[in-house]
Amino acid sequence: MNLSITKKTSFIITLISLGITNFATYFYAVSENKKRTAEKALNDSIDAFGNPGCSVKIQRLSGYDYIKPVLFVDQACESDKMSPIKQSVNTLIEEHKRLGTITDASFYLKEYQGNEWTGINVDGKFLPGSLMKVPELICVLKLEEANPGFLNKTLTFNKAYNIDKKPKYLSKSIQMGQSYTVKELLTYMIAYSDNNATTLLFDNIDLSVFKKVFTDMGLQAPDFTAQNHPLSAKDFSIFMRILYNSSYLNEKHSEFATELLGKCNFKDGLVAGLPSSVKVAHKFGESGDPQHSEFSESAIVYLRGNPYVLTVMTKGKTSEQLPGVVKQISETVYQQMEQASKVSL
């Protein structure tokens, strides 16, 4: 046997053996790395959606042949991380009940970074009042998307509306005999909460589209024969969420709607509990009678690094005190959300 060949063969076998060993080592390392990556992804998923055993509801938009767009995602479980906020708000609510400032309240908070939520009496029904102007705004913009130019249509305010509600917080109204574009009427409806502009618009929209704004969200359609359409804080928050997500209207009209909500000139409730430097898109609603008042407000609060939706609904004997309760809840939520935001940075 040729000795040189034997040495070469032995050397090649050694190289092959080393190669197999190194390949096995490499393969193991890659596998372990993939495993760690998968575990991290799972942990991130758990962080984003809370308890992995918690059920998740995905609301999708129907009406298409090949797609079913996601409108919003909800988990059934409340956030453990947000429990201190809930406890603080609950203390406030119970104290105001004891003092007689309010008789009932509902609070719903949804943050966007981790899709977590918390709340108190989130399914309790309240009279939304002018909060109903938000789905009407969405309806009008949906009509604009289907019929470009609808916003430029001119409508004339030429008849007095028999509006039972006497709003306390009205700053500006359209004038009898004057003509306005639909876009101008939206400003009066949202920025100034004008019921005349709201009713004039309502008389000129497709009511089936208005109902669909609710049913597309998985909510019950309004009964136009009924005097009121009670809503919960959690359900109403959906309208604010789909605007922020731009998951129902296109980007242009979602931006227009939230910008318009940012011009709402009522500053005594939720906004009063926020620093003036914080951008907010919001709408308030009042309802009731001299013996029973309700005041509600919902907002997208653009807290840097941790934006959130907050909806507060209250009931009490006098409407004058209710915005102050909403202010205190808003202030408490903002302070703790801001602190959490600083910790996460």
Image (tube, rainbow, N blue to C red):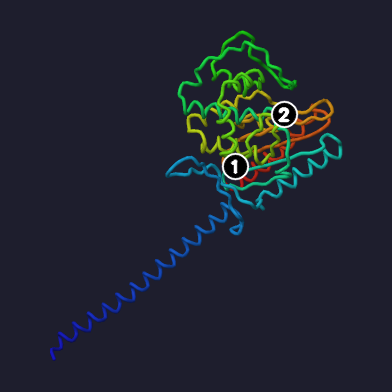
Q: Camera-side residue: 141 or 324?
A: 141
Secondary structure at numbered mark 2: loop
Q: Nearer the viewer, residue 79 or 190?
A: 190
- Give the mark count: 2
Q: Are marks 2 and 1 in contact (CB under 8 Å)?
A: no
Rendered view: 139 above or below 158: below
Q: Of discs 2 and 1, which sits in the foreground?
A: 2
Please state if 214 lies on the left or on the right of 232 as rendered: left
- Outermost front residue: 225
Residue 81 % position (x, y)? 66, 51
Q: Position of residue 335 (x, y in %)?
A: 68, 40
Residue sitting nearer the eye, 51 or 267 = 51
Residue to which mark 1 is pinned: 218
Task: Specify the amino acid type for callout 2.
Answer: Gln
Q: Quadrant of the N terminus?
A: bottom left
Q: Secondary structure at mark 1?
A: loop
Q: Is residue 28 left or right of residue 215?
A: left
Where residue 331 appears, x then y in whole percent? Answer: 71, 36
In the rendered image, the residue lying farthest to the bottom is 1
Residue 211 percent coordinates (x, y): 59, 33
Marks 2 and 1, how far apart at CA: 22 Å
Which one is nearer the viewer's eye here, 29 or 91? 91
- Give the residue displayed 78% in from the left and 34% down from the top: 315
Q: Tag on residue 227? A: 2
Rendering quarter of residue 215: top right
Disc assigned to residue 137: none
| Mark 2 crowdedness (10 Å alpha carbons): few <14, some 14-19, many ≥20 | few
Question: How busy is the neighbourhood of tag 1: few (under 14 within 10 Å), some, or many (20 plus)?
Answer: some
Residue under the point 60% across and 24% down: 263
- Among the two numbered marks 2 and 1 on one chain, the one whose residue lies closer to the N terminus: 1
What amino acid is at disc 1?
Gly
